[in-house]
Image (cartoon, grey):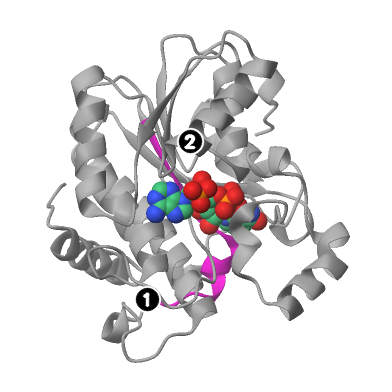
């Protein structure tokens, strides 16, 4: 199942939404898609940063088709406004890449009062996906790709304190959110299959690409340790984006597949199938998480 982005044919006519496309892995993903002639909607919380990213891509790919659309995943109102704006302009959507994320943030809440990491990484994308599903379902062969992480292996969905109101551990909250992203992708796949949907749901993780802004909330000690191990266990942002691009562009792929680097402990290397931890395959937990997410985000789908 080898994947080489250079062998992927042009995808002219396709439309993609990439959340958090202004920097890091989202930027590399948007750039590679634009290179393949996909029209990319840069769904970003800063218009200014997104426009700067577009300028940067256009320097390398002058005919790239890119458009900034404001999206703040920490606000239900913003997510709803984003989908309204998108649907007013477009009637199809081939690729939804749920990439944006925050990691190890000090305790904080979204505009709607949810803990920030689960709120942005999982709940925001849960609502976004639900609001875009109808448009994707009328698009032939549409794909939804959710970004998880190796951190999902250490995650637990703590239904007793999902929002970390009783106690907050920033690492546990990140692990939980990334497990939630993967469980969401798998549950979404099961539900789409049940409805014989056209759309498929996949997941991907980059391994370790520490040259992104994700590490901005690390402590000095964490940054020091990362600097020591970085050469052994990490790769470039460009390579980190490849599993996402494989999920988005590779043929054939099946709904429910999970892609990541295939090198040392999935931290780096060529993209391929990644290992899903047993805890992420628990269907009861996934169903309960879905129900809770529907309640919290005021949406019901599938
Ligand atoms: N880098 C890695 O090694 C690694 C490993 C495992 C998983 N991942 C996953 O890969 C994804 C991308 O991470 P990255 O490393 O590229 O991080 P990054 O450089 O920090 O980029 C994150 C993106 O998400 C955006 N974002 C954050 N909060 C948002 C919000 N409320 N609404 C909309 N957008 C928001 C950021 O916008 P601003 O620029 O405005 O802040 C930025 O565009 C994340 O889901 C992360 O969990 C990364």
Q: Is residue 187 above or below residue 176?
A: above
- Residue 274 at least partly seen: no
Q: Is residue 149 above or below residue 116?
A: above
- Which residue is tagged 1? 157
Quadrant of the frame with the N terminus: top right
Q: Which mark is residue 11?
A: none
Asked if the magenta segment contains residue 129, the reply would be no
Q: Is residue 74 above or below residue 219?
A: above
Q: Position of residue 21 (x, y in %)?
A: 51, 38
Residue at left offset 35%, top offset 24%: 141
Q: Residue furthest front?
A: 48
Q: How many marks?
A: 2
Image quarter of residue 16: top left
| Left or right: 236, with 59 as reference point | right
Q: Which SS class for mark 1? A: loop
Label 1: few (<14), some or many (≥20) within 10 Å? Answer: many
**Label 1 CB-ligand 1 distance < 8 A:** no
Q: Tell whether label 1 touches label 2 (CB within 8 Å).
A: no
Label 2: few (<14), some or many (≥20) within 10 Å? Answer: few
- Which residue is tagged 2? 48
Residue at left offset 87%, top offset 58%: 231
| Left or right: 252, with 184 as reference point | right
Q: Position of residue 147 (x, y in %)?
A: 49, 50
| Left or right: 265, with 218 as reference point | right
Residue at left offset 23%, top offset 69%: 288
Task: Find the distance from the CA under tag 2 to the CA under tag 1.
Answer: 35 Å
| Left or right: 85, with 215 as reference point | left
Image quarter of residue 114: bottom left
User: Residue 166 or 182: which is nearer the viewer?
Assistant: 166
Tell me which segment is drawn in magenta.
143-157
Q: Residue furthest bottom?
A: 166
């Amino acid at each position: 199942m080898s994947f080489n982005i250079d062998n992927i044919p042009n995808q002219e006519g396709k439309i993609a939404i990439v959340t958090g496309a202004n920097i890091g892995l989202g930027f590399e993903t948007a750039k590679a898609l634009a290179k393949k002639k996909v029209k990319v909607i840069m769904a970003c919380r800063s218009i200014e940063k997104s426009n700067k990213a577009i300028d940067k891509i256009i320097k390398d790919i002058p005919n790239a088709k890119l458009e900034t659309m404001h999206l703040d995943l920490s606000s239900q109102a913003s997510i709803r406004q984003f989908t309204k704006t998108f649907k007013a302009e477009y009637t199809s959507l081939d690729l939804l890449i749920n990439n944006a994320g925050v990691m190890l943030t000090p305790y904080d809440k979204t505009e709607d009062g949810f803990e920030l990491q689960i709120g942005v990484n999982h709940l925001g994308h849960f609502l976004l996906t639900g609001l875009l599903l109808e448009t994707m379902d009328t698009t032939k062969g549409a794909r939804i790709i959710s970004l998880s992480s190796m951190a999902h292996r250490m995650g637990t969905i703590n239904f007793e304190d999902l929002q970390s109101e009783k106690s907050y551990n920033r690492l546990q909250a990140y692990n939980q959110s990334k497990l939630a992203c993967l469980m969401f992708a798998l549950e979404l796949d099961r539900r789409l299959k049940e409805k014989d949907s056209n759309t498929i749901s996949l997941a991907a993780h980059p391994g370790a690409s520490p040259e992104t802004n994700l590490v901005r909330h690390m402590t000095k000690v964490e940054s020091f340790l990362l600097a020591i191990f970085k050469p052994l266990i990490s790769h470039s942002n460009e390579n980190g984006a490849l599993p996402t691009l494989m999920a988005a562009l590779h043929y054939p792929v099946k709904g429910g597949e999970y892609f990541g680097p295939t090198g040392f402990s999935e931290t780096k290397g060529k993209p391929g199938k990644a290992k899903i931890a047993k805890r992420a395959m628990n269907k009861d937990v996934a169903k309960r998480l879905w129900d809770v997410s529907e309640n919290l985000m005021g949406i019901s789908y599938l």
